Amino acid sequence: MKKRSNLQRLLSYAGNRKPLTYISWVLSAASALTSLLPFWYIWKILDEVISVAPDFDKAKNITHYGWLAVLFAVLTIFVYICGLMCSHLSAFRIATNIRIALTKHITTLPLGKIEEFGSGKLRRTISETSGAAEGYLAHQLPDKAKAIASIIGLLAMDFFFDWRLGLLSLVPVLIGFIIMMSSMAGPSLQKSMTEYQNALAEMSNEAVEYVRGIPVVKTFGQSVFSFKKFKSTIDNYEKWTTDYTLNMRIPMTLYTLAINSIFAFLIIGAFWFSHGNITGDFLLDMLFYIIITPVITVVLTKIMYMNENEMMVKDAIDRIDSVLNMESLTDPAKPSHPADNSVELRGVTFSYDGTKNALSDISLKISAGQTAAFVGPSGGGKSTLASIVARFFDPQQGKVLVGGVDVKDIGKEELMNTVSFVFQNSKLIKASILDNARLGKPNATEAEVMQALKAAQCMDIIEKFPNGINTMIGSEGVYLSGGEVQRIAIARAVLKNSPIIILDEATAFADPDNEAKVQAAFNELARGKTVIMIAHRLSTVVNADRIFVLREGKLAENGTFDELLKNGGTFANMWHEYQRSIEWKVEKEAEAL
C-alpha cells in the first residue's frame, strides 16, 4: 500500500471542506501574479518620465498608470484575503476533527497508558500539534502556492526586460538557495526538529508535575532544584537551542549575505554590460530590477521557512499518530457478566517496558466481601497489581478474573461500574462540590448526593461554606485540604456504589483529624463490598481478612495478620520495624514535652 503524504493525511480530516483547501491555493497563486502587475505599471511610469525628460509636462499617462497600480494592489489584497478565508475554514475543520479524533481515541485507551504518557505531554499533543497543523494549512500552504506562482512570474519578468540583468539577479538567489538547502535539507534537520519537539514535550510534562508539587516545595522550603527531573528538562532544552543556534550561525549569515547582494550584482552588471555608457533604455531596465529585487528576497526567505515548517508539521503528525496508534482497550463482542464480586489472579506477569517484569507469576484469590491488603517494600508492585485488577493495564501473561469472568470478557462500562478506585492523590475538577461528587453517578439526585457526602463524612466541609453543596472548587472558588479532597472522592465512590473498591493508600495526605474522618468514610464505603487496600501504614491492615505481601514484583507470602506474624517472614519484619518507628516517635515527643 502506498504511503500517504503528510498533506493527504491532514486533508483526510477535512470532510466536506476539502475543496476549500484547493481553492485557497488557486486564489493565493492568483494574488501572487496580480501583485507583480503594480511593478509593471511603475515601470511604465518610469518609462514615460525618462522618455519625456526634461520636459515632464509631456507625461500624460502617469496618473492613469498610477491608479492601475493601486487597483491591482487592492485586487491582490482582496484575492489573497479570499484565499486565506477558504484555507482557514478548511484548517479549522481539520484541527477540530484531529482534536475530536484524539479525544475519542483517548477515551478508549487503558487508564494506565494515559498515565504513562503523561498529562502535560498529552495536552500538548492535543492542543499544540493540532494547532501546528492548523497554522500550516491556514497560512503556510497558501503562502507556498503564492511563492511558487511568484517565482514563475518573477522569472518571466526577469527575462522579459533584459535577459542579461535577469540572469545576473538570479546568481545570488541561486547561491542563497544552495546554502539554504545544504543547511536545512536531509534527515539531520528532521532529527533536530524531532529533538526540539521532544524537549518541549518533556519540559511541558515535567512542568505540570512540578506545579502539582508546589505545595510540597513550599512546605519543606525546597527550591526548583529539588525537582531534578524538571530542571534537567530545562537544561536539555537550553542545550539544544544553544547548540542549534550555534550550528546555524554560519549558514544563516552566508544566506543573508547572498540574498541581499542582488543590488550589488546589478550595479556591477550595469557597468559591465553598458561599458560605462548607460542609455535611457538600459537605465529604465536597471531601475525595474532594482525595484523588483526586494520581492525576490522576500519570496526566497518564505521558501526557506516553509521547508522548516513542513518538517515541524511532519513531526506534529507523527506525534498525533503516536496517540492514535496506541492500542485501545478491547471490548468483547459478547460480554460476560461477573457472578459475584470476587477477584482472582492466575499466573499474572506484567512489564511496563517489555524488559524488566513489574509483576512475575502472581496468583491469588480474594473472595466476595473480603477485605484484602497489598503490602510490601516500596517498588514491590502493589499499585501495579491493583491497576491490573482495575484493567488499567492488561498483563502480558496470565488472567485476571472478576466474579469468575476474565476482565477482558467483561464490557468496559460494566467493569468500570463494578470496580471503583480511590487514588492516593485524588483530583477534583473546577466545578461545584455537587458536580464533583456526581461524577460517580451523573444522573444522581441532589438528595442522593447529600446522602453520599454524609456517608463520606463531608458535612463539616459543606457547612463551613455559605454556598454549601454548590460551592465552587478551584481558581474561581475555594481550595480544599488533601484530606477534604479525599473525602469528596470517597463520596463519589459511595455514590457509584461499585461492589469492588480499590483504595490506593488513600489516607497518605490526610492530617490526623482528617485521617480519622477518612477512615470512618472508608468503613461506610466498604460495607458489604470486596475491598483491596494498598497500604504503607501497616496499622490499617490489622483487621484485613487477607494480607498479600509483594516483594520485587513477586508474591512473597499471604495470610491473616496473626498468621503472617507467626510465620516470621517479610511481613513480620516490616511490622516490627513499624512498631519500633512508632516507639521512637513517642519517645521523641515525650522528650520534647
Image (cartoon, rainbow, N blue to C red):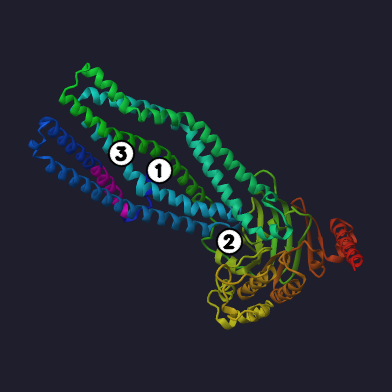
Q: Which residue is mark 1?
A: 6
Of pointers 2 and 1, the one earlier in the residue sequence: 1
Of pointers 1 and 3, the one earlier in the residue sequence: 1
Nearest the eye: 375 or 467: 467
> Residue flagged by tag 2: what amino acid is it?
Asp
Q: Nearer the viewer, mark 2 or mark 1?
A: 1
Quadrant where the C terminus is found in the figure: bottom right
What count of labels does the image hold?
A: 3
**Farthest top residue in view:** 275
Q: Which residue is mark 2?
A: 409
> Residue flagged by tag 3: what amino acid is it?
Ala
Label 3: few (<14), some (14–19) or many (≥20) C-alpha neighbours in 10 Å = many
Q: Which mark is residue 23?
A: none
Label 2: few (<14), some (14–19) or many (≥20) C-alpha neighbours in 10 Å = some
Whether pointer 2 and pointer 3 mark residues with C-beta atoms closer than 8 Å, the reply is no
Q: Where residue 62 sits in the image (x, y, percent)?
A: 13, 40
Q: Where residue 434 sits in the image (x, y, percent)?
A: 57, 76
Magenta residues, start to end = 17-31
Whether pointer 1 and pointer 3 mark residues with C-beta atoms closer than 8 Å, the reply is no
Of pointers 2 and 3, the one earlier in the residue sequence: 3
The CA span between labels 2 and 3 is: 57 Å
Q: Is residue 392 left or right of residue 142?
A: right
The CA span between labels 1 and 3 is: 20 Å
Nearest the eye: 358 or 402: 358
Quadrant where the N terminus is found in the figure: top left
Q: Secondary structure at mark 3?
A: helix
Q: Is residue 491 left or right of residue 154?
A: right
Q: Which residue is mark 3?
A: 147
